[in-house]
Amino acid sequence: MRWFTADLHLGHTNVIGYTDRPFADAAEMDEALVRAWNEVVDVGDEVWVLGDVAMGRIAETLPNVARLVGTKHLVLGNHDRPFDAGRRGEEWTDRYLDAGFAELHHGSVELEVAGTPVLLCHFPYRGDSGTVDRYLDQRPLDDGRWLLHGHVHEKWRQHDRMVNVGVDAWSGRPVAEPDLAALIAAGPDDPSPLPWAQRRQPAT
């Protein structure tokens, strides 16, 4: 099985408030994300992470990658340390590979989902998590292909031919290739993000 995900933001306390994640703190969030991943992904599966895997104190958060099962490929996002080649890029690449990624990719990757050519990139063709489109020079050219991406968090799950595979749109879990194939087969659309599978219980 092949899976896709993005924007785990392991160790990032502020993302909880930014995106209304149902956790009290980053430690609780990290454990829930690892558990949710390992509940659906098998050891022999392949997972494409479309950016922004770990933040916070990176020496503490990046080792969580080793706890995630499957063969993991990372398409770098703006919050991944090797994204900026000028900022000790080679050293950071080695650290991410040592943490458990099979390979790292800059920019976009061409792939097929159920026979349909798609692009993988951290960034959508257009749109952003905020009100202004950033990283315009890093975005793929919209040549009519479907695009699997992250970066926009809870803003949408699918918008036209852009499918956001980030955890904030898919109940905190990776999304399986057959689910993406079904969206693509149904054509351009705008379905809402799925709710998080785990909601924090209110204090009594």
Image: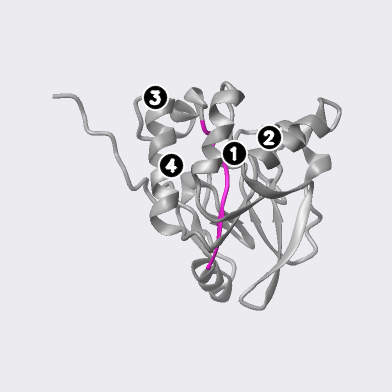
Q: What residue type is labelled 4?
A: Leu
Toward the left, the furthest residue is 204
Tags 1 and 2 touching, CB below 8 Å: yes
Q: Which of 84 and 40 is in front in this view?
A: 40
Which residue is labeled 3 in the image? 25
Toward the right, the furthest residue is 86
Which residue is labeled 4 in the image? 33
Q: How far apart are marks 3 and 1 (CA)?
A: 17 Å
Q: Work out whether residue 154 can be spotted.
A: no
Mark 1 secondary-structure assignment: loop
Mark 4 secondary-structure assignment: helix
Which residues make up the magenta segment? 1-10
Q: What residue type is labelled 2?
A: Asp
Which residue appears at 52% of the width and 26% of the height? 12
Q: Where is residue 101 in the image (x, y as percent from the top left)?
A: 65, 47
- Dot 2 or dot 4, earlier in sequence: 4
Which residue is labeled 2 in the image? 80
Q: How far apart are marks 4 and 1 (CA)?
A: 11 Å
Which residue appears at 78% of the width and 58% of the height? 142
Which residue appears at 53% of the width and 63% of the height? 44
Toward the top, the furthest residue is 57
- Dot 4 or dot 1, earlier in sequence: 4
Which residue is labeled 1 in the image? 53
Q: Which amino acid does label 3 sit on?
A: Asp
Q: Where is residue 62 in the image (x, y as percent from the top left)?
A: 58, 32
Q: What residue type is labelled 1?
A: Val
